[in-house]
Image (cartoon, rainbow, N blue to C red):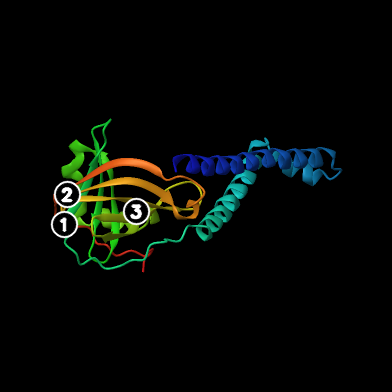
């Protein structure tokens, strides 16, 4: 999963590099034309604008804008569709009147998820444990919900079947938003373990990534609003 996203970032970097190279070619052509032109007006305009850095800046701004717009539109159209259906959760296998957190085994950090009755899962971020009170206040006052609503990678859906839990959410990256499915086992109504993850499009092509992510429950209210524009 991580390696695939790295490849996407490399492709994006190559696009930007190409834009830089193209800029230097354009500037060289402009320079050659201006110096060989018999029109004094063109030469005067070029010399006043040039100190070629100005032309480079203008061309780079234009190319960067075009590249960003085209990349964003293309990436948006290429975003993965969620393979899991959103289904209301009315069971009692897991408590949902709070949030679930996983502690990083190597650092003093936790990652947080909220589960909702409407089948939505919201990523609550990853942060240092000593920042918990500050983050919880942002959950309460609506600040986090307002910010989370802007980004697709915060959202997903979950399903529970007996002792099995499965959720799917988008992940951040420079290219299109990929959706990954995470599966695990419910140990009790306050604890579950995620054991594997995979991209739906890779099923049958790549082996799932294996994990041992233990999530513990913490009672918390009020939870951030689950309303979002990404999942109907």
Q: Position of residue 52 (x, y in %)?
A: 68, 36
The residue sitting at the top extreme is 106
Q: In the image, what residue occupies the spot 32% across and 55% down?
A: 166
N-terminal of the two: label 2 or label 1? 1
In 3D space, how far apart are the residues under numbered discs 3 and 1 (Cα atoms)? Answer: 21 Å
Q: Nearer the viewer, mark 3 or mark 2?
A: 2
Q: Could you tell me residue 93's position as x and y percent?
A: 18, 58
Rendered-image quadrant of the C terminus: bottom left
Q: Residues within 10 Å of mark 2 (few under 14, many from 20)?
A: many
At x 14% / y 53%, what residue is drawn?
220
Q: Position of residue 141 (x, y in %)?
A: 19, 55
Q: Residues within 10 Å of mark 1 (few under 14, many from 20)?
A: some
Q: Is residue 28 above or below residue 168?
A: above
> Which residue position is annotated with label 1?
95
Q: Are marks 2 and 1 in contact (CB under 8 Å)?
A: yes
In the picture of the structure, the residue carrying the numbered disc 3 is 154
The foreground one among 1 and 176 is 1
Direction from residue 176 to residue 221 in the image, left or right: left
Residue for badge 2: 217
131 horizontally vs 157: left or right: left
- Horizontally, residue 49 falls left or right of residue 162, namely right
Q: Quadrant of the N terminus?
A: top left
How far apart marks 2 and 1 lie (CA) works out to: 8 Å
């Amino acid at each position: 999963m991580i390696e695939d996203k790295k490849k996407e970032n490399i492709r994006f970097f190559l696009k930007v590099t190409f834009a830089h190279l193209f800029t230097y070619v354009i500037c060289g052509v402009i320079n050659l034309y201006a110096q060989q032109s018999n029109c004094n007006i063109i030469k005067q305009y070029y010399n006043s604008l040039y100190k070629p850095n100005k032309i480079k800046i203008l061309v780079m701004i234009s190319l960067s804008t075009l590249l960003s717009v085209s990349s964003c539109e293309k990436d948006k159209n290429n975003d993965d569709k969620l393979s899991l259906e959103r289904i209301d959760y009315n069971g009692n296998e897991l408590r949902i009147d709070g949030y679930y957190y996983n502690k990083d085994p190597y650092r003093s950090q936790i990652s947080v998820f909220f589960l909702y009755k409407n089948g939505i899962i919201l990523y609550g971020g990853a942060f240092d444990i000593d920042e918990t009170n500050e983050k919880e206040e942002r959950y309460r006052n609506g600040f986090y919900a307002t910010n989370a609503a802007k980004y697709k990678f915060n959202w997903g859906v979950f399903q529970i079947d007996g002792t099995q839990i499965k959720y799917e959410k988008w992940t951040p990256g420079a290219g299109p938003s990929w959706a990954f499915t995470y599966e695990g086992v419910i140990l009790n109504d306050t604890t579950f373990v995620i054991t594997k993850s995979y991209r739906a499009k890779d099923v049958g092509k790549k082996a799932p990534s294996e994990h041992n992510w233990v999530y513990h429950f913490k009672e918390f209210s009020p939870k951030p609003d689950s309303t979002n524009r990404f999942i109907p």
